[in-house]
Amino acid sequence: MAGAALRFLLLLLGVALPGWAAAGGPVLFYRYLDDHGGVVVNRSGVPPQYIGRGYEVLNEQAVVVQTVPPAPSAEEFRQQQARKQQQLQDRQLLLLYSSVADVDQARTRKLAEIDSLIAVARASQTSVAALQSRLQQQAGDSQRAGADVPDYIRERLAQLDQEQARLAQGIERYRQLRQSAEQSYAADRARLLVLQGPASTSQ
């Protein structure tokens, strides 16, 4: 009954507004909900304030020819964007690694590289400490001899203190970088297992 009533309503609208139909063009109607939840069928289109709720386009036989879904809510939009971002990251991951073994090899190389940088910085710390020790000994000799510590020794010791601080900060940055790399490779490994399955570990 509802369908028959709707077809009758559309027929009446078609008779009342025959211009385009008489010219041979398609006659389309738009069905949407108003502010009170009532169904509205309109030939002139959907008012802007209702478009976001979604609507249907019907032909003159009351057959739905197009359905426009409601606009997503803020949370639905956020979820959609998150899914798109995850899909993009997954494609990049599959292009970068063919198997979990590739991830493990890349992790080993990266950590070895960072460890090498830490070793170089520590070796520099040892060299600076040795130079500091020699200068401090010279300063002590001067004081024991009743002389003032030469200015160049004081200045050099101050510079070496700054160098030690810089090297310590560098080592700490390398440690943080190493930790971040471990977490990143662990996440890549886990995601690749999800995408490819456990069999990828033996490839």
Image: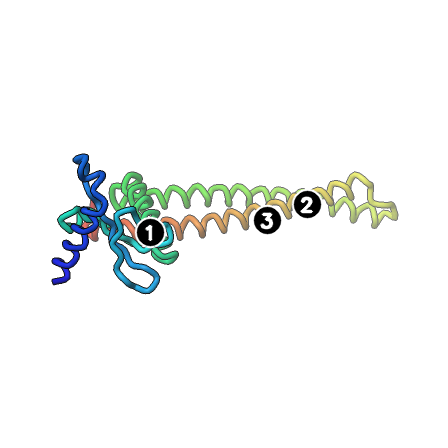
Q: Which residue is mark 1?
A: 51
Between the residue at mark 1 and the residue at mark 2, the CA separation in whole angstroms equals: 66 Å
Residue drawn at the location 30% of the way across and 64% of the way down: 37
Relative side of 146 to 3, left or right:
right
Q: Residues within 10 Å of mark 1 (few under 14, many from 20)?
A: some
Percent of width and height locating residue 186 = 35, 52
Query: Does residue 200 appear in this view?
Result: no
- Amino acid carrying label 2: it is Gln
Q: Residues within 10 Å of mark 2 (few under 14, many from 20)?
A: few
Say which element carries label 1: helix
Q: Nearer the viewer, residue 110 or 50?
A: 50
Query: Is the N terminus in the top left, top right, bottom left or bottom right quadrant?
Result: bottom left
Percent of width and height locating residue 167 = 60, 45
Q: Which residue is mark 3?
A: 168
Query: Does residue 15 appear in this view?
Result: yes
- Amino acid carrying label 1: it is Ile
Q: Which residue is mark 2?
A: 162
> Which label's residue is closer to the chain start, 1 or 2?
1
- Amino acid carrying label 3: it is Ala
